[in-house]
Amino acid sequence: MSAVRGHAVSFKADPFHSDDALVDIEDALVVSEDGLITAFGPYEETEQHVPDGVEVAHLPGSVICPGFIDTHVHYVQTGIIGAFGSQLIDWLNHYTFIEEQRFADAGHAADVARVYFDELLRNGTTTAVTFCAVYPQSVDAFFEESERRGTRMIGGKVLMDRNAPDALLDTAQSGYDDSKALIEKWHGKGRQLYAITPRFAPTSTPEQLEAAGTLWKEHPGTFVHTHVSENLGEIQWVHSLFPERKGYLDVYDHYGLLGRRSVLAHGVHLTASERRRVSETQTAIAHCPTSNLFLGSGLFHVHDAQVVLPRGPRRGPRARPRRQDRLARGRQGGGLRRPRPVRDAAARVPLRPGGVDRGAAVRAVDHVRRPHRRRHLLGRPPRPRSEGVLMSTGHAGYVHATTSMFGKHDQERPHDRPGGPEAWTIWILATVFVVWLFAIQTGYGIVSPDIQHDASLSIGQVSLAASIYTWAFAVCQFFSGSLLDRYGTRPLLAIAVAFVTAGAFLYSATTNFGTLVRAQVVLAIGSSFGCVGAGYVGGKWFAAAKYGLMFGMVQMFASLGSAVSQPAISALLRSMSWEQLLAGFGAFGVLLLVAFVFIVRNPVSTPEEIAAAKAEHAGRNVFAEIVHDLGQCFANRQVVLSALFAGASFGTMLAVGVLWGPRVQAARGASAGLAAILSALAWLGLALGAPLVNVISNRWHSRKWPSVYGLVLQAVAVAFFIYGPAQSQGVSVVVMFAVGLLAGTHMLGFTIAGESVPPSLIGSASAIVNGFCFIIGGVLEAVPGRLLPSGTPDLSDYRGALWIMPAILVVGALCALGLRERPRADAATEDAPAQAAAS
């Protein structure tokens, strides 16, 4: 018998349903015998339960409470916690699958299991629902260590027979046989319980999921542990693998894997009907807030889930929690609970006398909150700072990354951390590169009349040269992202700056059509690495949580740069020739090139990252990989329709902003300076419209209809720009700003394409959308030029030639109309609660 005295905190009811659930006793006594609580209460009332001769351990300044329960954790990922990654599938491929292959070695599995249990107990976690590896010996090591520690654990061998490295694959039959043997060996042995553990639907064939369901029916006392709806790309992947099923959750439902002892991790993007089904089957959702944020998967909306937890027969009818209670728990990280089986209590847990209180609350714990730098616990020396740890781990790491822009300085090398001064320096240089090349591109609309005159070119040749740039850029765009993934920013971005610099000098030396075309092609090759390169820097040098912010800032500065450059170029042309202006752009490029050569580099890779990169590309031809991925994306109807409507929207904006805007305004009687300012307003409108359209789409819970309405309105604005009556300056300002603002609709093309493919194809899908944007832009620059008469066209000539732009936008709207609306979760229709449990 043992007795502990001190400040105790426990619960007498479910805190999610009762305002009077908390038991907080400043001076309490907990008496236990043979691992069971025999007495608990205020010290003065409970000391009589302590026999003479039993010493009471007094713990002033401490808090006595039930052991924490982690409902979703991977012990085999202990060594890679916090490894930098973009999103879920990339993180699995680059880190997890490589690390888990080491657990084929039983000795390594035992070493990691010891570290894992040290960390669990150090953080007060006495029970965990745990993923092991695909190897049975990893399960043995896990349960053997749990037996030695006297903890209650739920774990199981991962089932995975496709879409993973060969070394990690089992088969439907071998997975069934191994799991069955492990159940017989470990389930119910001491305090150990077994969980049938398919990793997630994409890595199991229908045959394996069916075998898992059969195994659960044969052993109804076991648990099921898997993942569901963690990532939008993952959901689309499941739809492509199981097209006959209604959704992700329905895959598990179909194979009999939902029920009271089934724990599904994450559930970030469950729909209303899926949450209703979770509640009906009394399945538990393990909430994993830090992991969801770390990998950018999304936020689990606790108030939308309307959580009602499964109850035993002793409980009363279900009660819907008050909204303010749900929201308060959401603010606290979603402290939800999963009821424990009878006798599921660790020693010294203060529960009701004579047994275990199934209403005891469980703290929300997630599976990447472990402390940073535990490498020495695995028998390896701590990695020196110079090798580059890419991100601090867990909740503290996430808070650090998102609230401190430069972060805490390292005493040895404070400058080379992600988010540190060097990261910002490299990102600023990459963004300056984008703004600079955008200034050269958009300036073409202003200097092209002078080039046309001095080089004795026709308007058709000038517009054809602009379209050649756009087409060359579009083709190169398909390859730039994948090349950056393989070779990094150094030396590719320096080479790209060199190309743009050379193009600017060629541009300034234009004397004929051939020189102009060569300048445009060279510019296009270098420019194709601009935006994607700045985005790549944001993804590699900053925490995953900041990636969207950094890329959005690049796009904003690019649009603002285009807006500012046009009036600035017009002003400069009053004091210098166009040749001098473009040579000045080239001279700036030389300085920028020097900066890129001496400053820009790739983040230092860890040994795991180097191994992952080698494994991913070993024996493969990068161009063959790109072509294969592009082919898969072109076979996706949603991607093609998204590319077409985005191309119509941005292509029109590009043609107006770069070429036809200043010319039409000049034909209306505007001065060169005013025409440039009006065109700049279109880019300012785009800078606002690009982020705004996604906000509207999320508010409407729709991707399709904001795209349709945006394209229709853009067609109206462009038609008014071309065919509208004589306008005052104020009306012209509004029209041009509206043309750019509504062109922000094209951003939904990237969003829809990214949501329609697996995560591994998001880059290729985005490349297709971006390529179409510039291909269609090139068409809209070239075709009107062929329709215009030689000489100096007037307004009626432009009206006769530019009809193609509103027509293309109408076609784009029809493409958007053909999109399939994504599944949506409408909180207003949720009248049945879902249940969830804490991670």
Image: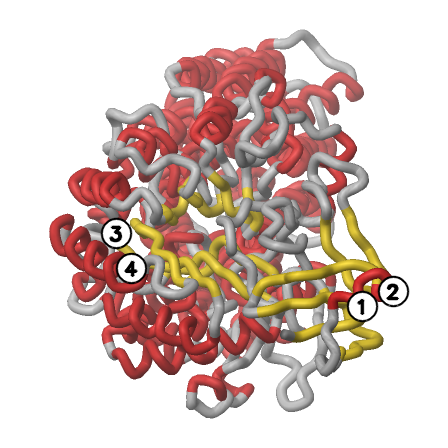
Quarter of the picture holding the N terminus: bottom right
Structural crowding at the residue carrying mark 1, measured as other residues with C-alpha within 10 Å and reported as few (<14), some (14–19) or many (≥20): some
Q: Answer yes or no: is residue 676 visible.
A: no
Labelled pair 2, 1 in contact (Cβ < 8 Å): yes
Q: Choose top left, top right, bottom left or bottom right for residue 542.
A: bottom right
Q: Which residue is mark 4?
A: 157
Q: Amino acid at mark 1?
A: Glu
Give how far apart the Cα atoms at labels 3 and 4 are. 35 Å
Q: Amino acid at mark 3?
A: Ile
Q: Which residue is mark 2?
A: 44
Tag nearer the camera, 2 or 4 = 2
Structural crowding at the residue carrying mark 2, measured as other residues with C-alpha within 10 Å and reported as few (<14), some (14–19) or many (≥20): few
Disc number placed over residue 626 in the picture, else none: 3
Q: Amino acid at mark 2?
A: Glu
- Of the image marks 3 and 4, the number of the one nearer the N terminus: 4
Labelled pair 2, 4 in contact (Cβ < 8 Å): no
* Secondary structure at numbered mark 4: loop
Labelled pair 4, 1 in contact (Cβ < 8 Å): no
Labelled pair 3, 4 in contact (Cβ < 8 Å): no
Disc number placed over residue 47 in the picture, else none: 1
Give how far apart the Cα atoms at labels 2 and 4 are. 49 Å
Give how far apart the Cα atoms at labels 2 and 1 are. 6 Å
